[in-house]
Every structure is written in structure tokens, then in C-alpha cells.
Image (spheres, rainbow, N blue to C red):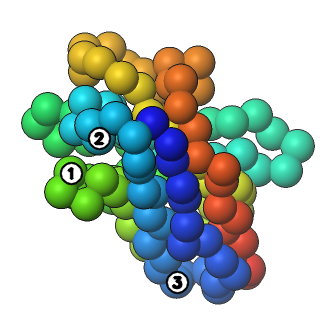
Amino acid sequence: VQLQASGGGLVQAGDSLRLSCAASGRTFSYYTMGWFRQAPGKGREFVARITRNDNRTYYADSVKGRFTISRDNAKNTVYLQMNSLKPEDTAVYYCAARFGGDSGSFFSPNDYRYWGQGTLVTVSS
């Protein structure tokens, strides 16, 4: 599967952004989808994921209550709605896909085989 992320930009603290990740290739509904981010000088960290079968969602504590992950299998797209953005949310955001079952935490980048190219989100104070 090929992934293309979009929607990043420069916003002020408190603003909202919605990231999109369009998938092509194999059947999108077979994949667990995740969002990760990487701030300058830091490692890639888990942000959110959504299961493939029943759309259960999981979030990092740092974004819980502010970010929402969703998917539209008819459009082969996963979204990340980001509200109440903070300067510490500044990072390159990556979407990722994992083929197969949903049992497991899948909070590590190593759990995902397919990656989008990343989209930069910059939040000014």
C-alpha cells in the first residue's frame, strides 16, 4: 500500500488542523492505520491509531481529548483532526499502515511496515 499524507501547515496555538492520509494499492480496510510524529531532534512517537475492523481508537496521553483519528474506507483515507494545538505539537506527522489483525498495542513505529512521506505541522505560540 502507498500512503500520501497532507494537510500540515503553520497555525497558532489553539487552532485546529485536519491531516489526511490517502492510501492506494491493496484493500485499505485490511490495514490498521496509525499516526506518528517526529519533532526536531527527537524520535518518532505514537500519536493515534484506528483498528481495521471496528474502528476502535487509541491515543497517546499527550493528545487525548484534543486529537481524533478516523477513517473512511470508501475513500481509502485516514484522518487526524487536531484541535487546541500547542507549540509542543510541532512536528512532522506521518501516517502508517499495518496489514492484518488488530490484536496488540501497535504503539511502536516498528509495528508498521508502510509509511507516508510526512507532513509538517508548526504551531506558533
The x and y percentages for residue 53 are: 14, 32
Q: Is residue 14 left or right of residue 101?
A: right
Vertical placement of 60 versus 72: above or below? Answer: above
Check contact, mark 2 vs mark 1: CB within 8 A.
yes
Q: What crowding class fits label 1: few (fewer than 14 Cα within 10 Å), some (14-19), or many (20 or more)?
A: some
Which of the numbered marks, if any, corresponds to residue 73?
1
Q: CA distance from mark 1 to mark 3?
A: 27 Å
What residue is pinned by disc 2? 28
The x and y percentages for residue 33 are: 37, 38
Earlier sequence position, callout 3 versus callout 2: 3
Q: Is residue 47 visible?
A: no
Q: CA distance from mark 2 to mark 1?
A: 6 Å
Check contact, mark 1 vs mark 3: CB within 8 A.
no
Q: Say which element carries label 3.
A: loop
Q: What crowding class fits label 2: few (fewer than 14 Cα within 10 Å), some (14-19), or many (20 or more)?
A: many
Q: What crowding class fits label 3: few (fewer than 14 Cα within 10 Å), some (14-19), or many (20 or more)?
A: some
Q: Amino acid at mark 2?
A: Phe
Vertical placement of 82 versus 26: above or below? Answer: below
Q: In the picture, which quadrant includes the N terminus?
A: top left
Q: Is residue 11 left or right of residue 97?
A: right
**What residue is shown at x 41% (from left), y 48% (from top)?**
24
